[in-house]
Structure formats: structure tokens, C-alpha cells
């Protein structure tokens, strides 16, 4: 081997001056070992008389070119104390030949060198306990800014490098290149050129292993990574990453691309079916074919314990849940059991167990869904002590033999809200025409807001009054972090609007509307008004008691979204309240946000 970290072997000693002595002792003898296959040991057995033998065969699993190493995942991002150190002890018991990380080793995200040195000292106190070499790889927590990048290079010599062992190439790369990875993750041109030269110089290796922190293949703009992948296509290779804290095996370019879970990093630890567990990856190279085993800190698992296909399925379910709970409306009496229409469908090729629970009322229902099967039934739920602000909270779980997914659900019988007719409103923010402005009052710890809704022949109107003696607005930040009104309205048919979970994709298609207005001046309007549907008008005004807002929504938009003369729409209002003494604004909503609330909450019906 002629190079290490882009430098000649004579330079390794210079780099070693800045590396803890324990690494210098490990690295140099290890890297200088030539690849010379040893003579294969044989078994000596006594002669057994007769035909029987106390063994199956004598093909020993001891190829002279076989070796083992370990890949360790994230330690940080809401790290849990003691887990990484426990992993070191477990790895030492298994005696691999060396260990490689995929980054996020310290908490980082600061520029204070005293804090950073303390964090690195603690981490290195664990790595010194390894009885085999440990190779560092930079993660976003380790390489966040220029101060941390400089400290990395002083401590560890290089932020990307390579080594060769037993005719196998190991590329330890830096997805945080230039400390800008969180904005635009990719390799720099210099790193790409380095990889290109190393691959060209090691064209004859039997396998190439690549280590980096972020799974750059998930980023369309990672141009230099795409170029790197093209270089890897013609060789046998495997790629190891972390960052997402959810395990997934990606079958990509006829190779295994790993996103490892955690070994102490932040995780809900719901288990293998969720891809959330503490583990390390045991890698065995036999000839030119690697064998992978996931070793949990309490067991051993195969490499496909969670595949990318499983993860994609669950991500799709999160955006488009395979179940539907229809809204139930009342006219005043909520007593007794309510039949709640419920539909579930199995779009997979697996048999699924469906479980619906509402613990507070002792409700639990379990069904089996065969591949392609749909289920329609009524859930009998007690409505006496539930309303849209204090609903029954439960959970839906779908589980196969190898993966599981759950989703919170809420339910309450909903009041049937009628939309009154009234005279035309002059949209000026003054509320002079609003005798019903107190129809809906939302109290909170600092005051309240109230609003009214009405229609005339051309528009639906919403008028809002916010009581606030200390207006904090106009400092150029998002409406989410200053005094502001946020209005959401979904005009689609009830079957669609009731299931809106603040779906971003539908919002971008103009299927529903989200309006924000902040009292930045005596008279103000909606933010990003150019993105609102045609004909929507919004004007607000400030006064000594707070501020007001009037919104007009044309009937033609509601008609268009329902494909006929409209019959209903869904509404929610939120007030963001900023206080000088508190960095973040608090939010107060009429209804629980649709993403976590009752299906159909806030629906108004036309008289």
C-alpha cells in the first residue's frame, strides 16, 4: 500500500503526531500488513471404524482470505448515555479485526472549543477501550462549522481517506464536506477527485467498502455523489451510512446500501419492525462476497431486518393512511354509543393484523386483513364525554410478520355547524357589520380570540377579533413566531375534507387554503397573498385592544372544488401569540390541528 489519506506512507507518521497514541499504535502495524494468504489449517481426526461419522462433512469454514470487521452507527442526536460504551464492550467480545464508524460521534453543534474538547475526550475514552483499530468518519454533529472542521483535522488528520486490507479497498468519506451538508449535502469537487484517483489506483481489489454519514443517494442535488456512484458501478461494492436513525437496507446498483439505525443515538426504540433499535453491523468478507449480520446489543439479526421497501410502505401509509374513519355529526345530544363508519384496506402482499384501540373507554378491536382485502364495519364508541377539543385518543396498528406501523387517531361526535346568511361585508378589517363576531370564543391563558362566519350571495366571510394588549409583529420572521392569525379552509366534498391531515401536497395543488396574516402595521393583509385562490380578499386592522381580520372567500372557488353548488366546508383558526419574554410564540386553536384532531372537525354546512 502506497497511500493513506492522500499522503505517502512517510507522511502517516506526521499525521500520527496529531492522533492519540493508541491510534498510532493500532494503525501503522495494521495498515502495513501485506496481503499474504496463510496456509489453510486442516483437521486431524482418528480413524472411525464402520460407516458412521460423528460429523456432517469436513469442508471447514476457514478460507485464508476471509476476515471480519464491524460498522457502528450514530451515537448522537438526543443521545442516550451509556449505550455507545456498552456497544464497545459487546464488540470486544466478538473480536473483529477492526471497527469503522459512520459518524455522529459527539453532540457538537457548537463553536466553543472547551466544550468540543470535553466531548471528544469523553468519546475517545470509549474508543481507547477497543481492543482493535477504530476508524473515524465525520457526521453532521462532528463537523458542523469551521471551528469543528478545523478541530477534526487537527485531531484526526484527514476528513476523508482510504486504506487497503487483504486486497480490499475501504473508503472513509465525508458527506459533511465544507460543513454545509445540512443545506446541500454532497461531496466537494476535491473529494470527488480524490475518490476517482483512489478507485483508479485500486482497480484490482476484490471488493470496495464505502463509509459516510448521510445517505447521499436520497438527495437529488448531490451531483458529485452521483458521479461517484457511476465510478462504483463497475466494481463490487457496499455502502454504509447512518444519520436517519431508522434502519433500512437499500438494494441499489446491484449492491447493498445500508442506512444503519443507532448505537445510543436518539430513537423511540420501537423495535426491528420499525427499524428502531440499537445495533452494530458485523461484516464478513469471503473471497469477494460480503456477508452481513445485524447484531443488536441483545441479539443477532439478518441484514434485511428492515428493508427500504418496508420503510417506503410505512412512509406512504403515514401520508396516505390505509384506513378511513368517517365523521359523525350531532344536533345537541351526544349520549350513548355511536356507530362510527370505519374502512380499512390491505394494499400489500402480506397478511396484516389490524388493531384499533381507545384505552380511555376500554375499546379494543382486532381483525385480520388478507392481501388485497378491504374491511368495512362500525365501531361502537361512547360519545357522552368526548368533544372536538377533548376527543377520545386512540391508536391504529398494522402489523405483519416482519414489520409494524402505528398511527394516532382521535374521535368525538361533532356538532353540526350551520352557516348563517347575512348582509354583505366590506372587507376592511373593522368588523363594523359583525353582530355575530362572538359566535365562537377561544379563551387561553393570555386572553382570547373570537370569530364569526357567514355567507351572502357571492362570498363566505370570516371575521376574527384577537384580544392582545402587547402586539409583537413586524420583525420579518415567519408568522409562526410572531403575533398572527392562521386560517385553514378545505372546500372539497365532505369525504375528502374530513380526512385532511394538513396534507402538504394537496395544499400545493390549491385543493385547500392556508392563510396567515400578521398585524405588522395599522392596516395589514395576508402574507404571500399571491398564492391564495383567485378572488380571496383579506384585510386586517390594529386597535388599542388588539387586532381584527376579515376574509372573503368567493363561492365560485367553493363550487369549483365540489364540482357543484357547494354544500359544506371545513375551517380551523389558530392565533399565534408572541411575548417579549419568551423566544417562541404560543399557538391557540379553535379546533385541534387537523393533523392530530378529529376527522371532519370544524365543518360548516350550508343552510
Image (tube, rainbow, N blue to C red):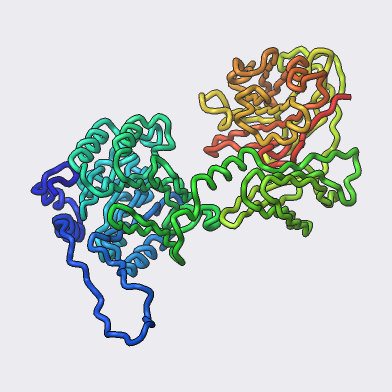
Whether residue 488 is visible to the viewer of this picture, yes or no, is yes
Which quadrant: the C terminus?
Answer: top right
292 vs 396, left or right, is left
Left or right, residue 133 beside residue 354: left
Residue 186's place in the image compared with 402, above or below, is: above
| Residue at the farthest left position | 10
Q: Nearer the viewer, residue 431 or 85?
A: 85
Q: Residue 178: in sight, yes or no?
A: no
Quick one: which residue is furthest to the bottom in this view? 49
Q: Going 76% across and 44% down the picture, which residue do you hit? A: 343
The percent position of residue 159, horizontal first and vertical second, equals 25, 43
Residue situated in front as seen by the camera: 327 or 352: 352
Figure quadrant of residue 71: bottom left
Seen at 84% across and 32% down, the residue is: 417
Looking at the rendered structure, the number of numbered marks drawn on it comes to 0
* Residue found 77% across the figure and 22% down from its top: 562
Q: x, y (%) of residue 497?
A: 73, 31
- Where's residue 418, x and y in %? 86, 29
Question: Percent x, y for residue 126?
Answer: 31, 62
Is 592 above or below relative to 64? above
Tell which of 20 and 526 is nearer to you.
20
Q: Residue pushed farthest front?
A: 50
Res. 118 image quadrant = bottom left
Amino acid at each position: 500500500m502506497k497511500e493513506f489519506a492522500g499522503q505517502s506512507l512517510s507522511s502517516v507518521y506526521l499525521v500520527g503526531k496529531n492522533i492519540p497514541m493508541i491510534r498510532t499504535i493500532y494503525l501503522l502495524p495494521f495498515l502495513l500488513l501485506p496481503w499474504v494468504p496463510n496456509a489453510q489449517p486442516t483437521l486431524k481426526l482418528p480413524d472411525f471404524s464402520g460407516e458412521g461419522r460423528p460429523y456432517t462433512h469436513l469442508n471447514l469454514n476457514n478460507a485464508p482470505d476471509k476476515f471480519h470487521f464491524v460498522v457502528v452507527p450514530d451515537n448522537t442526536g438526543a443521545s442516550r448515555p451509556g449505550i455507545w460504551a456498552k456497544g464497545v464492550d459487546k464488540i470486544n467480545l466478538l473480536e473483529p479485526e477492526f471497527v469503522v464508524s459512520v459518524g455522529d460521534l459527539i453532540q457538537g453543534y457548537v463553536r466553543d472549543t472547551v466544550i468540543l474538547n470535553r466531548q471528544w475526550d469523553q468519546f475517545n475514552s470509549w474508543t481507547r477501550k477497543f481492543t482493535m483499530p477504530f476508524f473515524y468518519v465525520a457526521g453532521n454533529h462532528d463537523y458542523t462549522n469551521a471551528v469543528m472542521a478545523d478541530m477534526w483535522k487537527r485531531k484526526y488528520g484527514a476528513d476523508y481517506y482510504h486504506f487497503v486490507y487483504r486486497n480490499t479497498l475501504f473508503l472513509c468519506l465525508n458527506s459533511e464536506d465544507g460543513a454545509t451538508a445540512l443545506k446541500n449535502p454532497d461531496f466537494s469537487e476535491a473529494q470527488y477527485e480524490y475518490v476517482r484517483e483512489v478507485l483508479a489506483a485500486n482497480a484490482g481489489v476484490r471488493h470496495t467498502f464505502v463509509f459516510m454519514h448521510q445517505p447521499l443517494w436520497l438527495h437529488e442535488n448531490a451531483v458529485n455523489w452521483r458521479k461517484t456512484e457511476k465510478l462504483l458501478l463497475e466494481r463490487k461494492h457496499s455502502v454504509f451510512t447512518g444519520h436517519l436513525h431508522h434502519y433500512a437496507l437499500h438494494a441499489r446498483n446491484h449492491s447493498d446500501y445500508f442506512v444503519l439505525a443507532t448505537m445510543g443515538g436518539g430513537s423511540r426504540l420501537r423495535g426491528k419492525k420499525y427499524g428502531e433499535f440499537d445495533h452494530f453491523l458485523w461484516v464478513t468478507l469471503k473471497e469477494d462476497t460480503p456477508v452481513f449480520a445485524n447484531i443488536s446489543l441483545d441479539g443477532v439479526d439478518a441484514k434485511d431486518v428492515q428493508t427500504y421497501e418496508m420503510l417506503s410502505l410505512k412512509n406512504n401509509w403515514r401520508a396516505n393512511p390505509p384506513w378511513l374513519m368517517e365523521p359523525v355529526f350531532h344536533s345537541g345530544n351526544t349520549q350513548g354509543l355511536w356507530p362510527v363508519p370505519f374502512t380499512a384496506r390491505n394494499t400489500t402482499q402480506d397478511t396484516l393484523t389490524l388493531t384499533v384501540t381507545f384505552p380511555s373507554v376500554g375499546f379494543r378491536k382486532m381483525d385480520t386483513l388478507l392481501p388485497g382485502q378491504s374491511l368495512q364495519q362500525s365501531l361502537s364508541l361512547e360519545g357522552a364525554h368526548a368533544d372536538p377539543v377533548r376527543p377520545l385518543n386512540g391508536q391504529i396498528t398494522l402489523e405483519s410478520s416482519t414489520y409494524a406501523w402505528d398511527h394516532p387517531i382521535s374521535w368525538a361526535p361533532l356538532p353540526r355547524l350551520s352557516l348563517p346568511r347575512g348582509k354583505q361585508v366590506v372587507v376592511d378589517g373593522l368588523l363594523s357589520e359583525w353582530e355575530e363576531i362572538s359566535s365562537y370564543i377561544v379563551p387561553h391563558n393570555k386572553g382570547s380570540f373570537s370569530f364569526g362566519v357567514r355567507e351572502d350571495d357571492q362570498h363566505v366571510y370570516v371575521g376574527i377579533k384577537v384580544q392582545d394588549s402587547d402586539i409583537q409583529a413586524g420583525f420579518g420572521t415567519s408568522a409562526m413566531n410572531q403575533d398572527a392569525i392562521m386560517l385553514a379552509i378545505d372546500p372539497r366534498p365532505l369525504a375528502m375534507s374530513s380526512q385532511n391531515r394538513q396534507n402538504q401536497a394537496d395544499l400545493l395543488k390549491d385543493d385547500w387554503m392556508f392563510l396567515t396574516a400578521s398585524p405588522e402595521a395599522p392596516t395589514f393583509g395576508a402574507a404571500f397573498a399571491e398564492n391564495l385562490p383567485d378572488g380571496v380578499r383579506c384585510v386586517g386592522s390594529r386597535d388599542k385592544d388588539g387586532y381584527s381580520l376579515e376574509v372573503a372567500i368567493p363561492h365560485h372557488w367553493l363550487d369549483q372544488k365540489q364540482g357543484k353548488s357547494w354544500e359544506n366546508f371545513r375551517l380551523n383558526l389558530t392565533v399565534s401569540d408572541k411575548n417579549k419574554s419568551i423566544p417562541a410564540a404560543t399557538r391557540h386553536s379553535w379546533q385541534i390541528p387537523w393533523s392530530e384532531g378529529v376527522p371532519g372537525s370544524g365543518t360548516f354546512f350550508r343552510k
